[in-house]
Image (spheres, helix red, strand yellow):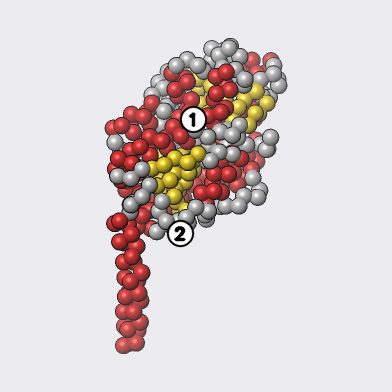
Amino acid sequence: MKQSRVTAFLKKALFLICAAPLAVMAQEWPNKPITFIVPFPAGGGTDAFARPLATQLTKQLGKQIVIDNRGGAGGTLGASIASKASPDGYNFFVGAAHHAIAPSMYPNLDYDIEKSFIPVAMIASPPQVIVVNPKNVQVKNLKEFIELLKKNPGKFNYASAGNGSTHHLAGEQFKMLTKTFITHIPYRGAGPAMQDLIAGQVDIEFDGLGSSSPQIKNGAIVALAVASQKRAPGFPDVPTAAEAGLVGYEVSTWYGLFAPKGTPQPIIDKMITEVQKALNTPELKTIWTNNGSETPNLSGDAFGKFVSADIKRWAAVAKASGAKLD
């Protein structure tokens, strides 16, 4: 009995000795700039939420949050770079629903979104939206759009943020449900894809509402429907796909903050608190509404379980739609 008490005391003492430096580290953190690795070029949906969040967190933490755009390979290049970043609390990764799709599309990833990262918090969850260049695709609504595609198989194309992105899978799912054929044109991110959609180099995009919202509002592109159960915040005039006649077409995206595996838990906990505080500021709530997203409240292990479930969901969509790398 005496020996067991001594053992328990030694274990507790060892825990306190190990925990003390971490607690001090969390109190002192941050004492230098923090990097957010964004795995897409500037101007896409990830940027639409990551940059305002970084600005707000910079105010709250008193240290600069630096955005490092690392686009390529449907967001997997940036994820690979982030997975190898130092887990010192000064490197974070802004992942997206694309990274829940990637395991089904890219067989040789050198990272694992579930094992290489610690989930911090979901930061936004806007629906996908069907948008077209009004000069190339002259329709008034989703019904006319589908009829046009059926009459002209292979004539039109759609841009995506890259192979294995939500844009890609949303397009393939749309084709499967409507029995239409549209050529897939993958880009290095939603920003470059949107530029070519506006210029008329491509006809259609199944985009996250965050990156499309400014262009919809200024009339550069036309929104036919959002792929959600209810109309998006800030876009009351854009019908859902079901309201427009396409029942069963529901595709939302999400953006979330992750840390490289090994990042001290006290720093993770502090970042969770700061992100939740930032998301509830009037400034970010207004931006999120304008970008068609509600403010999420999902962090830590709960966010991790959401990501795991989303990986399984997208695997089923990829298999059913027959999506492949182009």
Dot 1 crowding, Cα within 10 Å, few <14, some 14–19, many 20+: some
The amino acid pointed to by label 1 is: Gly
Query: Considering the image in quadrants, where does the N terminus appear?
Result: bottom left
Residue occupying the point 44% across, 32% down: 48
| Tag 1 secondary structure | loop
The residue to which callout 2 is attached is 262
Location of residue 82 in the rendering, given as x and y in whole percent from the top left corner? 51, 49
Type of amino acid under label 2: Gly
Does residue 118 lie above or below 23 as drawn? Answer: above
x and y, in percent, of residue 252 in the image: 49, 34
Residue drawn at x 43%, y 46% as measured from the top left: 35
For this view, does 181 lie left or right of residue 30?
right
Q: What residue is rendered at 61% in x and 40% in y?
A: 73
Determine which quarter of the picture holds residue 150. Answer: top right
Tell which residue pokes out farthest to the front in this image: 32
Query: Residue 43: which disc?
Result: 1
* N-term-proximal mark, 2 vs 1: 1
Q: Nearer the viewer, residue 301 or 76?
A: 76
Residue 236, horizontal then vertical, whole percent: 40, 21
Q: Where is residue 110 drawn, in percent x and y?
A: 60, 52
User: Which residue corresponds to the image point at 43% horizontal and 18% vertical from the top-left?
Assistant: 217
Q: How many marks?
A: 2
Mark 2 falls on what kind of element? loop
